[in-house]
Every structure is written in structure tokens, then in C-alpha cells.
Image (cartoon, helix red, strand yellow):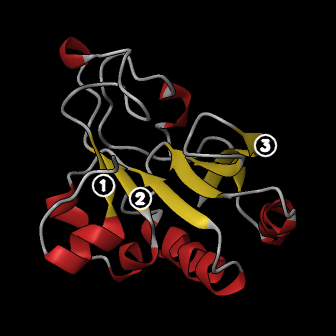
Amino acid sequence: MNYHDITKEDLLNGPGVRVVLWVSGCCHHCKNCQNPITWDECSGLHFDEAAEKELFEALEKPYIDGITFSGGDPLYINNRKEVCRLIRKCRENYPDKSIWLYTGYKWEDVKDIEELKLTDVVAEGPFIENLKDNNLEWVGSSNQRVIDVKKTLAVNKVTLVS
């Protein structure tokens, strides 16, 4: 898996102060995507042991509220194995920090990925330019949903973050 950046103190991609891993690779290619440079899975840097160490050292800081996986698309088919491993490791090492994941896939198409049950929030759906809404929190177009994963699994019905 490749990645473009590890943001160590982000305030825009989930609540509180977060670490964000920006992965490479996306098949959605949404018109006017905010991050098209990440579409090519070969772009950026290889996510190696040094990158993983950097990611987890950033997460260790007590003022960090959690991690957000973004990109690109963390659930792009060639990213899934590594991202799922990282989700498991984050949950094991930092059980009190929240895990957010952004994906262009619909929840219904990815909800059976076991590691998503370890996340707190999945912001899902492709960005659709003619549904762009600057008043939305956490997403860019009105078709996208910000799903509370724990509540969704508990009631077996998609529940949005309120």
C-alpha cells in the first residue's frame, strides 16, 4: 500500500485532534474530488515500517483523540488488507481513541468487512458535485452519510452521527 501523508494534528477529518493517514488508490474518481492526486495507487510513498512507526508515535500523544483513514480510498481493493490490519492494531493499542474511515463505497457494499466493526464512524459514498453542500459537517455532498458504526450494528439499521 502507498500513502501520501500522515497528518499528525488534524482538526477537519473527525472530532477533536486527530492523526490522518492519507492512502493512495481510489477507483471512484469523483468529479471535482478534493484529493485527485491520491487516485493512483502507485503514487506517494510505500507504507513501510518507518511510516507505521511514525503513525503510531503520533497516536501515542495524550491529546490525540483518534485516527482517520482517508485518501484516496482506504477501502480501495488493494488497500483493504493493510488498512484492516492497521484498524485492528489501532483498536488493540488505543482502545479509547476513535477510529474514523472515509470511503467512496456505500455502507451496504462494505459493511461485511469485519474490521469495520472496530471503527466508530464510517463516512461513506462518492462525492457528487451537483449534490455539493458546504453546510454539511464531515462530508462534501448530501448523498454521503456519516454512520455511527456501533449504533448501526446494535440496532441493525443505519444510524447517522448526530
Residue wearing tag 3: 9
Instruction: State left or right for residue 116 relative to residue 40.
Output: left
Residue 113, numbered label: none
- Give how far apart the Cα atoms at labels 1 and 2 are: 5 Å
Q: Position of residue 117 (x, y in %)?
A: 37, 78
Q: Which residue is drawn at the image coordinates 62% and 54% (left, top)?
A: 2
Image location of residue 123, percent across then percent down:
36, 48
Please rate how many residues cluster around mark 2, counting C-alpha atoms within 10 Å: few if below 14, some from 14 to 19, many from 20: many
Q: Are the two marked residues, 1 and 2, in contact with CB atoms closer than 8 angstroms?
A: yes
**Mark 3 vs 2, N-terminal side:** 3
Q: Residue at x 60, y 74 (%)?
A: 86
The answer to whether 115 appears left or right of 64 in the picture is: left
Inspect the image, locate mark 1, and give the three-letter code of the amino acid beneath it: Ile
Q: Is residue 152 left or right of residue 100?
A: left
Q: CA distance from mark 3 to mark 2?
A: 19 Å
Say which of 62 and 1 sits in front. Answer: 62
Residue located beneath label 1 in the image: 147
Residue furthest to the bottom in view is 92
- Tag of residue 121: 2
